[in-house]
Image (cartoon, rainbow, N blue to C red):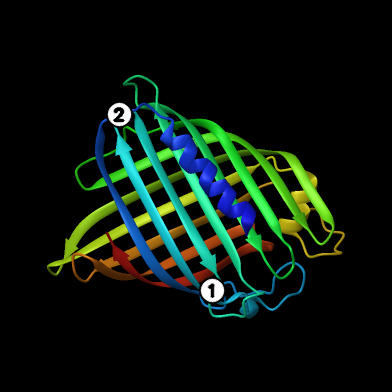
Amino acid sequence: MRKSVMTLIGVAVSVATLPAKAEYLFGFGNMYLDYQAWNHGFGNDNDNFGNDIEDRNQAVLGIEGGAVFDWGQVYGFYDYEGVDRAGDDRGASLKGTIHYNLAESGASLYAQVYNTDADKNGFHEQNRVLGLGYTALKGDNWAFTPFLGFHQINQSSNGSSNSGNNGGMFGYSGFYNTTIANQNITFSTWNELEFARNDKYSDAQSKTFGSTDSSESWGLNGSLNAMWHVTEDWSTGVLYRYTVNKLARKDYQDLIIYRVQYSF
């Protein structure tokens, strides 16, 4: 977990070194309590190593925030995972992204870091993406922001490791704010398509351990979210998470996250 904290500090320092005279346009910040139900949804298979998928069910305490400036935009979150489990059986995940605008073309330089650690089995994985994005697809109540970049990985678990190039990643994030029956609702989504992954990573993500079947060099990871803003500060909603050949689960799998959120 120390690696996660140090990475978060690194992201904060990097953002702090951006132009001091940058104009802040708008932003948001949330704290939330999630319950990740890995055995809810349509794909409830055990993982590729034969572990019962229900064992992944957990409560998560998290914080996220984003901001848009005249030079670009940033987003990040930190999840403290397994808060309903014993203190030596928890984990942490964090993500930081940045789009740095290239003049006024709508194109941007894009960078992403995602890091996850687990206490019990010593699992660690960090994904790094560097490429190009596009930030001009937006309106008063919506935005859609794609990116494409080179993907690197640093992974270790139970004495094995996998580091270096891991192909490429195409992804996007988006949101739409609307009103239904006089209630404020936000629909949002994100998606990451990995392609040309290295053989070791592909094997772990897309086939049963010990199988002689060929693995898939691509994987998909994303979410479809609906949040009801009960008051100005409090919201609740459901996040439908889906994967294909990702999170050590071959083929199409999913989970459902139930969230209560406080905005500040």
- Indicate the quadrant containing the N terminus: top left, top right, bottom left or bottom right: bottom right
Provide residue 44's location: percent of width, then percent of height.
Answer: 60, 75
Q: Residue at x 46, y 42 (%)?
A: 12
Provide residue 72's location: percent of width, then percent of height.
Answer: 36, 32
- Indicate the quadrant containing the C terminus: top left, top right, bottom left or bottom right: bottom left
Left or right, residue 106 beside residue 251: left
* Disc assigned to residue 22: 2
Q: Residues within 10 Å of mark 1 (few under 14, many from 20)?
A: few
Quarter location, residue 225: bottom left
Left or right, residue 112 beside residue 164: left
Left or right, residue 56 beside residue 208: left
Provide residue 59's location: percent of width, then percent of height.
Answer: 50, 75
Provide residue 64's location: percent of width, then percent of height.
Answer: 40, 56
1 and 2 marks in contact (CB < 8 Å): no
Query: Is residue 171 visible from the viewing direction of this image?
Result: no
| Residue indicated by mark 1 | 42
SS type, badge 2: loop
Residue at far top of view: 103
Q: Amino acid at mark 2?
A: Ala
SS type, badge 1: loop
